[in-house]
Image (cartoon, rainbow, N blue to C red):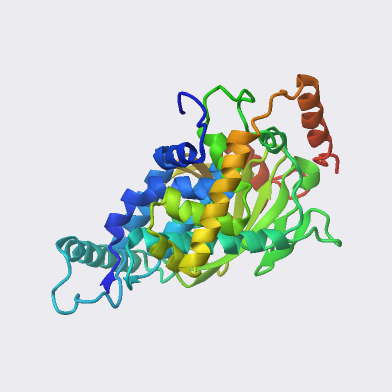
Amino acid sequence: MSERRPHTESELIEFVRSIDVRAPEELHRRIDALVEQSAATPRRSFAGRSMGLAPRRWRLGGALAAVAAAALVLALALTGKGSSPLTLRQASALTLAPAIMVAPGEDSQRPTQLNAAVDGVSFPYWGYRFGWHASGARSDRIGGRAVRTVFYSDARGQRIGYAIVAGTPAPALSGGVVSVQGGVAYRFLAQDGSHSVAWLRNGHLCVLAGRGVSNAALLALASWDGRGSAAT
Amino acid sequence: MRTLDPQSLSQHVDRLYRAAWALCGSREDAEDLVQETFARVLSRPRVLQGGGELYYLLRVLRNTYLTGVRTASRRPVTVATPDDVVAVDPRPTLRPDSALEVSEVYSTIAELPEDFRLALVAVDMLGLSYREAARALDVREATLTTRLFRARKQIATLLIDSAPATPVPATRREGTKLSGVLSSGETP
């Protein structure tokens, strides 16, 4: 904040240039996580790498990535599952990403559903019951699986994302806290100021997440099947 | 020509966030835009062909922003929310002698035409040279100079010359807020 309002254009431009507002810590953490993730991922075609000219941190990153990849292969071998290594964290990240597609409309035949589905698993219509209206969507591919996400917004401007991962069996998840409601296991995870819940619908992994939305609210939405009982 | 070092990108988060805030006019949208920008940049190895990291980040930020704007323009209009309505009047003060707020400046920049806004953000907020900014925005240097000149004039007009003398009555602001809530279409 300046001590007084600028009186000339040059003073104003100086003020604009001098603004040093810091980005929120949460954003810094998210970017740092992206950078770390990037460093841990095997990367192709970096100039000089094949000639041993990579900077030290890249060589260290490469070693870490190799260890991580080996651990993943070992974990898959031990669990006997060949499913994709999609993680809840990755799926949750999608629900917090920007929408890049138009929101699907309400299904005219089934008023509790939207006109969008993954392998026959439909996204719910929550506008009437909960006041959450579909506001956007996106489609991604992670770990060889298609992931479709629909974003919902409420009257207070809050936003949540609902992702359904294609393919069965669903990727194995770990971490978080599991709560069983109506015979369905809901796995809750809190990270970087957001809350996520993951569960299965017809064998498909579903993830619902948002910032500033409580676990209870997420559970109420996740467990709703149009009649007030838990989803299956 | 050199490869982009992801580890060095974190130092630009604050500057990029300020640029995104001025582009979007909203802190929340700015956070999303910066995160999406970094996600794009970090999705695969990048080669810097002339220009620094900020130049490259601005290019991606601009493309991400424009993609988002185009997508949003195809979206159905979303309902107004109480928060949105309050943000209609982002100026925390209407007294010309009082301090100038950052949010007021960024909101004003966000109201500029897109080309002007990008020019101002590139040069005055990210600190790029005219040449770098012109390259990042895919325009000639002369065009950038003109846009920057006009952008500066416009925000100066908005923030210096036309400081409003009459505060908006509280009842009117309440009324605006109320109409926004009523138009939100909460009733299904």
Residue at the (57%, 53%) spot, across then down: B150
Q: Nearer the viewer, residue A70 or A201?
A: A70
- Residue B167, position as x, y percentages in the image: 71, 23
- Residue A136, position as x, y percentages in the image: 67, 57
Left or right of residue B179: residue A18: left
Residue at the (50%, 32%) spot, across then down: A6
Q: Nearer the viewer, residue B169 or A60?
A: B169
Q: Is residue B84 visible to us here? A: yes
Q: Is residue A11 above or below residue A128?
A: above
Left or right of residue B79: residue A72: left
Q: Nearer the viewer, residue A95 or B79?
A: B79
Q: Quadrant of the C terminus of chain A?
A: bottom right
Q: How many marks?
A: 0
Q: Is residue A203 visible to us here? A: no
Q: Is residue A17 above or below residue B168?
A: below
- Residue B129, position as x, y percentages in the image: 37, 58
Q: Is residue B123 above or below residue A170?
A: above
Left or right of residue B110: residue B140: left
Q: Is residue B155 above or below residue B149?
A: above
Residue at the (63%, 37%) spot, across then down: A217
Residue at the (77%, 46%) spot, across then down: A127
Name the image quarter holding residue B65. bottom right
Q: Nearer the viewer, residue A212 or B113?
A: B113
- Residue A60, position as x, y percentages in the image: 17, 62
